[in-house]
Amino acid sequence: MKEKLVSIIIPVYNSEKYLEICINSILKQTYKNLEVILINDGSVDNSEKICDDLSSKDKRIKVIHKKNEGVSVARNIGLELSTGDYIFFIDSDDYLDKTVISDMIRYCDNYDVVKCSYKFVGHDKKVSNIISRDKVYNAEDFIKEILSTDIGGHSWGYLLKKSIVEDIYFDENTSCMEDTIFIIKCILRCSTIKCINSSYYNYMYNENGITCSSIRIFKNINDYMYSVNKIETIIADSRINYECYEDLLRKKIILIEAEVAKITTKQDLKILFENKNINKELNQIRNNTELNILYKIFSYLVVNKKCFMMMFYIRARRLLKRVIKGR
């Protein structure tokens, strides 16, 4: 019997440093019946040439070059072009263990979706954390896991039947949690989700953190709020009986706090303090859900515009993060 075709979709943007590692980890999969779709999203580094060179050596690779419009547009183009029986997403700076696809596809006859476990890998190849599950979920329980645990709401690492993904696309109105919106929509069409831990998706993270402009920080916060509210609506309109309100409030404050922790100047803090939408969100969260002490302190400082104490909080948080990583 002929093997099912798996379409692997990779959005590419300025990934020259890791792109070959990513693509070679796919070409070296023990499962060979693959369609590799590279969407070069207006890269200005050497990514375009790397895509073209690799596609000339392996007929399984398709390359599309386009202007920069963001990862959601790139993934949606990949979905439109895919011809496989299954869909798998990977980011262009990540890579796979060589048996990931073969380990996942053997479960596909019995489950609607299969998800592999993953490792956080630094650029020195040191593994800092492993997120692993070996379990079967129904749709409601898995969505609860996405919103309240470390299993993650990313789109990568899932082997999705093309029939499930049909007519579902990435939301192009947000650049944060667009993959969570997508994957929740897919999961809501499923009865069973199988997580495996026999091989791993390797997620490359930046050990030094990401430096953002204040404009980017506030855009991220607004996008996160949009996405969380969208998820609440999707779940409310679905067939599952999941009271997600408090989980989503906690998710909001975690996301807001993580973005605010990137602020480096008092001027940007003052802009934050005057942001009525953020203050409204934090007040709503404080009044409607239980928070741990960290987030209670954070929300109090922002809502009450404690600039000096907030700068101290941000510095202390960064120091604590470095200490934890150094263990």
Image (cartoon, rainbow, N blue to C red):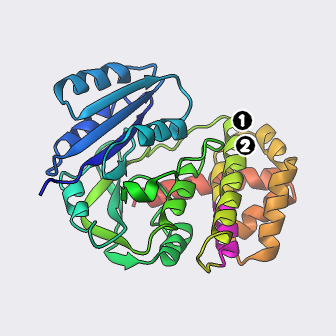
Q: Secondary structure at mark 2?
A: helix
Mark 1 near mark 2, Cβ–Cβ under 8 Å? yes
Q: Give x and y (percent) for residue 106.
A: 21, 65
Between residue 170 and residue 157, name the one nearer to us: 170
Question: What type is the residue that disc 2 sits on?
Answer: Phe
Residue 191 visible: yes
In percent of the image, x 55 and y 34: which residue is there? 70
Residue 94 visible: no
Q: Give x and y (percent) for residue 5.
A: 24, 49
Q: Is residue 285 left or right of residue 104?
A: right
Q: Quadrant of residue 232?
A: bottom right
Residue 210 against residue 190 in the figure, above or below: above
Q: CA distance from mark 1 to mark 2?
A: 5 Å
Between residue 277 and residue 51, name the one nearer to us: 51
- For disc 2, the marked residue is 218
Q: How many marks?
A: 2
In percent of the image, x 58 and y 52: which residue is there? 177
Q: Residues within 10 Å of mark 1 (few under 14, many from 20)?
A: few
Please provide the residue range marked out in magenta.
243-254
Is residue 152 found inside the magenta-colored segment of the image?
Answer: no
In percent of the image, x 68 and y 47: which residue is there? 223
- For disc 1, the marked residue is 215
Q: Quadrant of residue 283?
A: bottom right
The secondary structure that most of the magenta stretch takes on is helix
Q: Give x and y (percent) for residue 296.
A: 74, 70
